[in-house]
Image: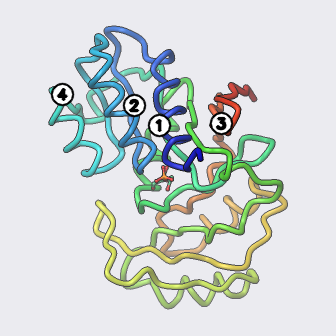
Amino acid sequence: MVTQDDLKRRVAQSALRFVLPGRVLGVGTGSTVDLFIDALAAAKLDVKQAVSSSGRSTAKLAAIGIEVLDLNDVESLPVYVDGADEIDAGFHMIKGGGAALTREKIIAAVAQSFVCIADASKRVEVLGRFPLPVEVVPMARSHVARELAKLGGRPVWREGVLTDNGNLILDVHGLAITDPVATESRINQIVGVVTNGLFAARGADVLLLGGADGVRELRR
Ligand code: 5RP
């Protein structure tokens, strides 16, 4: 039987063809990205430098001898490879299951091409079954939770989790996100929100979707 981990491994492997030799590579966060970094190490491609969206990925990259640069020192980033918690037909995503959404969104904004690597379970018709992560400045947690409830969601504090930026995560349950661009913008306007896990205004450009019958490459 093909497991979800097998599918993640296959998409991770197939993302290697998007890596440009000699160029800085953008690397996201999560279990699929962990497998991508493993594949990168095994393939011995000409990748010497990367930018990373989390301490977790930075440590893994450093362990295989890839220098992790400060994004401020990078003028252009041709490719960013990252996973997703959900992705719809318009290539809008929910991300942030690994609490790295803010750094992921910043790197995605800089990258010319966002290559999303996901197993088939991540492809959905309507975003929102996966609780939407929202990064919040600690003193604003209750205020932001009240405002999110007014939008129809049920925010749950991810207790014990601090982001790499020293902030908190609220996971918003019960949203059916039919207009991801508007919802992303609306939630970002709540005072105290750093950003939310909707990647809609800037979605993915390429989706590598791993299913039982292989990896499909889809373009927006
Ligand atoms: C981390 C993320 C991840 O890309 C997302 O959670 C998918 O993770 P996984 O590859 O473990 O399923 O957004 O903040």
Give the Cα distance between marks 3 and 1: 11 Å
Neighbour tally class for label 1: few under 14, some 14-19, many 20 plus, Cα within 10 Å: many
Depth check, mark 4 against mark 1: the one in front is 1
- CB of residue at label 4: within 8 Å of ligand 1? no
Depth check, mark 3 against mark 2: the one in front is 3
- CB of residue at label 3: within 8 Å of ligand 1? no
Q: 59 above or below 126?
A: above
Location of mark 2 (residue): 26
Give the Cα distance between marks 2 and 1: 19 Å
Question: Residue placed at 32% from the left, 17% from the top?
Answer: 43
141 sits to left or right of 59: right
Q: Which amino acid does label 4 sit on?
A: Glu
Whole-percent x, y for residue 118 in the image: 59, 42
Q: Which of 179 and 13 is in front in this view?
A: 13
Q: Which amino acid does label 3 sit on?
A: Leu
Q: Nearer the viewer, residue 10 or 66?
A: 10
Badge 3 vs badge 2, beta-carbon distance below 8 Å? no
Give the Cα distance between marks 3 and 4: 29 Å
Question: Residue placed at 50% from the left, 25% from the top?
Answer: 15
Pick out the residue farthest to the front. Answer: 1
Location of mark 4 (residue): 67
Question: Who comes first in sequence, dot 3 or dot 2?
Answer: 2
Give the Cα distance between marks 3 and 2: 19 Å
Badge 3 vs badge 1, beta-carbon distance below 8 Å? no
Location of mark 3 (residue): 209
Whole-percent x, y for residue 150 in the image: 72, 87
Question: Who comes first in sequence, dot 3 or dot 4?
Answer: 4
